[in-house]
Amino acid sequence: MIQCAPPAASLVHNSSQKALALILTALLLALAACGKGDDKGSKAKRPVAVSVAEATAMNVPVLVLAVGNVEAYASVVIKPQVSGIIAKQLVRDGQDVQIGTPLFLIDQRTYQASLQEAQARLQKDQAQSQKAEDDLRRFKELFDQGAVSREQLEQIQANTIGLRASLALDRAQVEQARLQLGFASITSPIAGRAGHVLVQEGNLVGKSSDDRALVIINQIQPIFVSFSVPERHLPEIQKQYALGQLRVEAQTAEGVVLDTGRLASIDNAVDKTTGTIRLKAVFDNKGKNLWPGQFVRAFLRLAERENAVVIPAQAVQTGVSGPFVFVVKADNTVEMRAVTVSPAPDQSMVADTGVAPGEKVVVDGQVMLVPGSAVEIKTAKDAPKAKEAAPAAQANASAPHANAPAAAAPPTQKPPAHFAGNATKNAGN
């Protein structure tokens, strides 16, 4: 059987169909890829949901923030003044003591015997001195009558003077023995709290080679907090300190208020290695919340600053170049601005530069933002309410602004509650 080849025209037609099908498939795949790319682009341009707060102009106190160290108002190391065995331990670890509270009793028998010996010697010399005084009066009468010679009278006078001196020495020895006996009973010289008792009953103390402390007593009511601030604040601090008392508040690192005190002293020299001046504040410490050696955050109030731009502390972020905030512009995009800030009451910061009153700053959602990012402001029910700064209560005196440390305070910081008060916002801003 003979088979015939298909016509050439039919082969050409089939090849064209196959090519057309391949072209159509490629176009569909390209369109699908473009569609996916458009989806990605639309997702990238989706606005970031953020919470914002408005920068407000108001009167706030000028605060200087520093890390302080609590120091005892007075500290006494109790050491024995006489040697002997500790017969009684009358103080326990951590006991509150008053002036004159008994602490230790050293064996007194030796010192009681010494006192009795000195008193007996005094009594003996008193008798001899009295006899000499009587003899001197009689010999003067006999000398006036010519019954005794001048030499005999002078001898009696010399004996009497010698006995008078012996009597004075005996009295001093009695007093010395009484002091030694008193030193055997150790009492507290100040009111405060005892530390760990370092020597217990039965120990021999007070030998010439023994310099052991028995216990250390710290006075904690009142108590000191010392802290250092940059020297640029010194002129303003001196000015306000001369006008009246400057209030200082001590807080924990978490912002818990421990006590409120007053500035007690300014050091007599600036530390040239750090460029800081050391200050010391005194606190009544009635609640005993401050303890020697404790580190606290010290807030020194200098004066009241008018028309300060206040923003929530949560808005301030810290970057490589320092503090910055994201400001929402009219087109709902954000601008990153460097700022200089200082502490303000009620979890707020004073923006010295970088933010104007009325501008909106981002307080939540900054982690997703870059300069120029589009944002969507959360509604009031969805966004956490940002606390506004509480205004100042009372100004010590009008004073120019003194910047506090530039580092932004952490959101957990709780500035002085008593610094908040009743001041009004500026209506024009």
Image: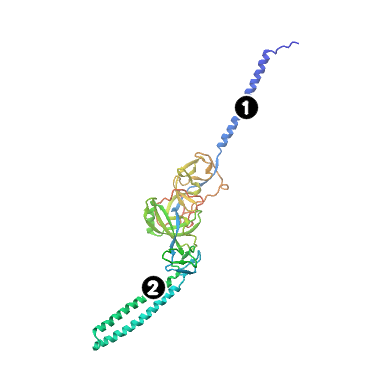
Point 65% across, 20% down: residue: 18
**In the image shown, does 17 or 148 lie closer to the viewer?**
148
The amino acid pointed to by label 1 is Leu
SS for callout 1: helix
The amino acid pointed to by label 2 is Gln
Q: Can residue 227 be seen in this view?
A: yes
Q: In this view, does 417 lie to the left or right of 162?
A: right
* Residue position marked by numbered label 1 in the rendering: 28
Q: Residue 183: horizontal and vertical position, in percent?
A: 43, 70
The number of numbered discs placed on residues in the rendered structure image is: 2
What colour scheme was applied to this rendering of the protein? rainbow
Q: Is residue 426 visible?
A: no
Where residue 378 sits, quadrant-wise, is: top right
Q: In this view, does 171 lie to the left or right of 326?
A: left
Sequence order check, earlier mark of 2 and 1: 1
Q: Residue 163: horizontal and vertical position, in percent?
A: 32, 79
* Residue position marked by numbered label 2 in the rendering: 176
Residue 156, above or below 95:
below
Q: Residue 370: horizontal and vertical position, in percent?
A: 51, 40
Where residue 213 sits, quadrant-wise, is: bottom left
Point 39% across, 78% down: residue: 119
Residue 305, above or below 73:
above
